[in-house]
Image: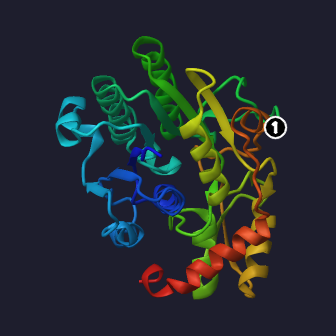
Amino acid sequence: MTTKHYLITGGAGFIGSNLLRTLFRDEPGCRITCIDNFDPFYSEKIKEFNIRPFADQPGFTLHRVDLGTTTGAELAALIPESVDVIVHLAAKAGVRPSIENPLAYQRSNVIGLQNLLDFARACKVTQFVFGSSSSVYGINDHFPWNEDEQLMPVSPYASTKLSGEMLGHVYSRLFNIRFIALRFFTVYGPGQRPDLAIHKFTRSILAGEPIPFYGDGSTSRDYTFVEDIIQGIRAAMKYSGSDFEVINLGNHFSVSLKELLEAIEQVTGKQAIINRLREQPGDVPKTYADISKAQRLLGYQPQTSLHDGLQRFFEWFNENRALLLS
């Protein structure tokens, strides 16, 4: 069997490091080139921890590169070996911070993608998987959301993800690059970023600190366990049915903020101290994925219940508490 060479961007992050672990486990002998700029949006120590298990893995190469400032030609010189599939997960994250510094999000998320697509074009990489976001739907009460909905982003972050989808369509049409955009719905699980609700709530509950609780608790999200997302990404890496697709990857089940907090309290065995705050600009009231297209094209089927996913996150948190609470 011919071994594959994968280029994974954002490999030191939450979803990226879970993808690396799965690929090395399931495809012995595969080669993975990882690009990550270790953006200081959250602690670099956590990203170092995420990437450490792969440092001595045969066939693994890490490049600390900022895609927003590195041209396609420079990437081609850095990575001379042929690449079978690109999975682009690197991005400047966070809805609320994007409102404060939108230009930084344009540079990282749009120009960075442009440079990587130029690399794919120059090096004739024909399979490109892009990590998009459910935030592109904006405020839309046609639930569950399917991929043909009208898109009305309400944050600069969301607008960069929509721009990325359209940029991928251009390169797919012009340069024979199969571009699969995956709209992720609120991913959680072991390795989750510390700025996201489940991680932040767990940390505060265990520390006996107040939880910042925005709104009345009625906002809801389609929480998707990271292993289910990885299943969808890997199917997209092999997909060959068409040259361009946009596909939801969610759990097809929306959970309110109040219900989420109660579930975390149950898993941790501790009650939360709540600090009620006003709803934040850029946040949407509800997300809810129609996953029928992912089921049809990718054989995607989420397997993990919220309780089981939270339990596995909590076990990971406890195992790594010294790092995560430092």
Residue 82 in picture, x, y percent from top left? 30, 36
Secondary structure beneath dot 1 equals: loop
* Residue farthest front in this picture: 1
The residue to which callout 1 is attached is 144
Q: Is 124 placed left or right of 183 in the picture?
A: left
Image vertical order of residue 148 relative to residue 65, above or below: above
The quadrant the C terminus occupies is bottom left
Q: Is 234 placed left or right of 114 in the picture?
A: right
Image vertical order of residue 80 relative to residue 245, above or below: below
Query: Which is more toward the observer, 10 or 124?
Result: 124
How many other residues sit within 10 Å of disc 1, few (<14), some (14-19) or many (≥20)? some
Query: Which is more toward the observer, 317 or 201?
Result: 317
Image vertical order of residue 99 relative to residue 242, above or below: below
Residue 57 visible within the image: yes
Residue 290 in picture, x, y percent from top left? 78, 37
Picture residue at 41% right of the left edge, 37% below the top: 84
Name the colouring of the figure: rainbow
Query: Which is more toward the observer, 126 or 117?
Result: 126
Q: Is 5 placed left or right of 222 in the picture?
A: left
